[in-house]
Image (tube, helix red, strand yellow):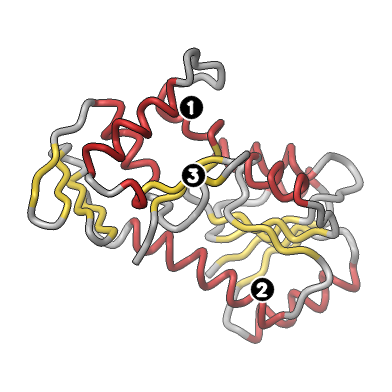
Amino acid sequence: MRALLVEDDLRVASALSSALRRRGHMVIPATTAAEALRAGPVDLVLLDLNLPDRDGLEVCRELRRRNADVCIIAVTARGEEQDRVIGLRAGADDYVVKPFSMAELQARIEAVMRRTARAQRAEGVLEVDPLRIDVTARRVWVDDREVSLTRKEFELLTALARQAGTVVPRERLLLEIWQTTFAAGHTLDVHVAALRSKLDDASLVQTVRGVGYRLRVA
């Protein structure tokens, strides 16, 4: 796996690089935002948010804009709840606060990569028990019951299923489905409520207050 390590503290970067390589990862180091944005395609980004030339949150947003599927884990000393919320909203899939153990970081890497692999496991088909979504045919089943969804409901469910188990920020859903972050009339909330009703299990789509929504995994 190709991992982009964005960390300006050379001591920390060296220790993380060595630990990642011992676990079989190919590490591409970057000490600045400019180097990070010049890097080629990778599977994983470990992103320090305190960079010397640019706010790491801006880098996170840009990396996410360029590649919706890349796994991004913010690795930072910013540990307040609001910092975590902002980081997730900026596009991070997970958020690890320094200091941390390598065992914890590796577990988080594996969890994020598993979620990505699960979403991409079958071409054109997403399966998140009890859901089966045929993306090509735009059909949805809950167990063996087919569910009829509107176009926006289907796009919403698919966006959540592609990152099942992960909180998807409201802003990202609005951008992906409505191409705006200023949808009026609580548009997203209304569609989530309709989707929950049609799936006949309100707990499948979970609200993460102040951040966004998450599709439950078994």
Q: Image point 50% across, 13% down: which residue?
A: 184
User: Is 108 left or right of 174, judged from the image as shown?
Assistant: right
Determine the CA span between mark 1 and mark 2.
30 Å
Label 3 SS: strand
Residue beneath disc 2:
105
Task: Estimate the x, y position of residue 160 in percent, counting from the top left.
Answer: 39, 45
Check residue 207 in the rendering and tell me which mark sits there, or answer none.
3
Q: Are marks 1 and 3 in contact (CB under 8 Å)?
A: no
Disc assigned to residue 174: 1
Q: Position of residue 40 (x, y in %)?
A: 60, 51
Residue 126 is marked as: none
In this picture, is 106 found above or below 115? Answer: below
> In front of the other: label 1 or label 2?
1
- The residue located at (43%, 52%) in the rendering is 163
User: Residue 182 sits in which quadrant?
Assistant: top right
Query: Is 63 left, or right, of 123 in this rendering?
Result: right
Crowd rating for badge 3 (residues with CA inside 10 Å; few <14, some 14–19, many 20+): some
Q: What amino acid type is highlighted by mark number 1?
A: Leu
